[in-house]
Image (cartoon, grey):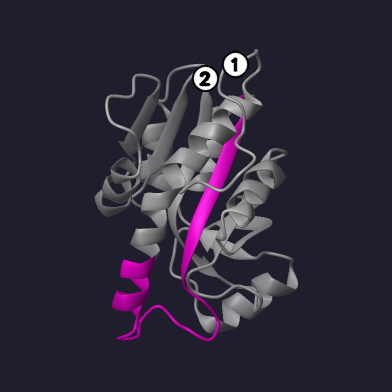
Amino acid sequence: MTGLLICAALGIEAHAIRRGLPAHLTDVRVVTTGIGPRRAARAAGHLHGQGAVAVVGFGGAVAAGLRPGDVLVADEIRFRGRTHPCPWAALLVEELVRAGLPARTGPLLTVDHLVREAERRRLAGQGVRAVDMESGPLARAAMDRPLAAVRVIVDAPRAPLLRPATLARGLAARRTLTTLGPFLMHWAAAVAPEPVSVPLRKEPLP
């Protein structure tokens, strides 16, 4: 592996990801960017290195086919009128599905506010599957580096964010985040621009 940088908005997300990573790694870094496009843009200015970048954390679904607990791997990131393709999404989704996780691909839109129900319907009509608040600026900063944006869904059209059940959904999503680290490592190895000694696993992780 030539290096993997994992970006999470919240400390709780970063902590969950670190829990699932092997100890004493030297080529994987997990950083906390802060919430929202502005903080993500500031953090993006300090992202150095040549390895793969993964933006990982919680997200909100706008498409009816996504439910809390599902994992969306963006095949494109939309932000302020620009679209950033993620051509390696299918490789990661295939691995997650093989391991039994409910993973999907689709467009991810980065927003700067909480999306309400009427806006969910409008965005779904535009082909958006989920929203977050950080991936767009980080995708711009990644340039030509391999990029993955992975969001564990916490709220959805039939499960709004501001409800008592959100806490339980958030805890379940955090548990899912703890499982993602090894998959991201194998993905980064598989998309590295030079030969690596760690191939993508062909069997589910324990």
Looking at the picture, which amino acid does disc 1 mark? Val
Amino acid at dot 2: Met
Query: Crowdedness of circle 2 by 10 Å Cα count: few (<14), some, many (20+)?
Result: many
- For the point 56% across and 48% down, the residue is 204
Check contact, mark 1 vs mark 2: CB within 8 A. Answer: yes
- Judge by depth and name the residue closer to the eye, 178 or 9: 178
Q: Is residue 40 above or below residue 146?
A: below
Residue at 42% across / 25% down in the picture?
Answer: 47
Q: Position of residue 162 (x, y in %)?
A: 35, 82
**Over which residues does the magenta segment extend?**
145-172
Q: Is residue 4 above or below residue 113?
A: above
Residue 50 place in picture, x, y as percent: 52, 17
Helix, strand or loop at mark 1: loop
The residue identified by callout 2 is: 1
Q: Which residue is drawn at the image coordinates 51% and 17% (left, top)?
A: 2
Q: Residue at coordinates 26% horizontally, 47% vertically from top-left?
A: 15
**Label annotation for residue 196:** 1
Q: Out of 111 and 108, give the one closest to the viewer.
A: 108
Q: Secondary structure at mark 2?
A: loop
Q: Nearer the viewer, residue 128 or 22?
A: 22
Answer with left or right where residue 41 lies relative to residue 110: left
The vertical placement of 106 against 170, above or below, is: above
Q: Horizontal and vertical percent for residue 127? A: 74, 66
Question: Is residue 161 among what the camera can see?
Answer: yes
Q: Name which of mark 1 and mark 2 comes first in the sequence.
A: 2
Asked whether the viewer can see residue 75, the reply is no
Whether residue 109 is in magenta: the answer is no
Graded by Cα atoms within 10 Å as few (under 14), some (14 to 19) or many (20 or more), the crowding at tag 1 reads few
Left/right of residue 184 with respect to residue 90 in the rendered view: left
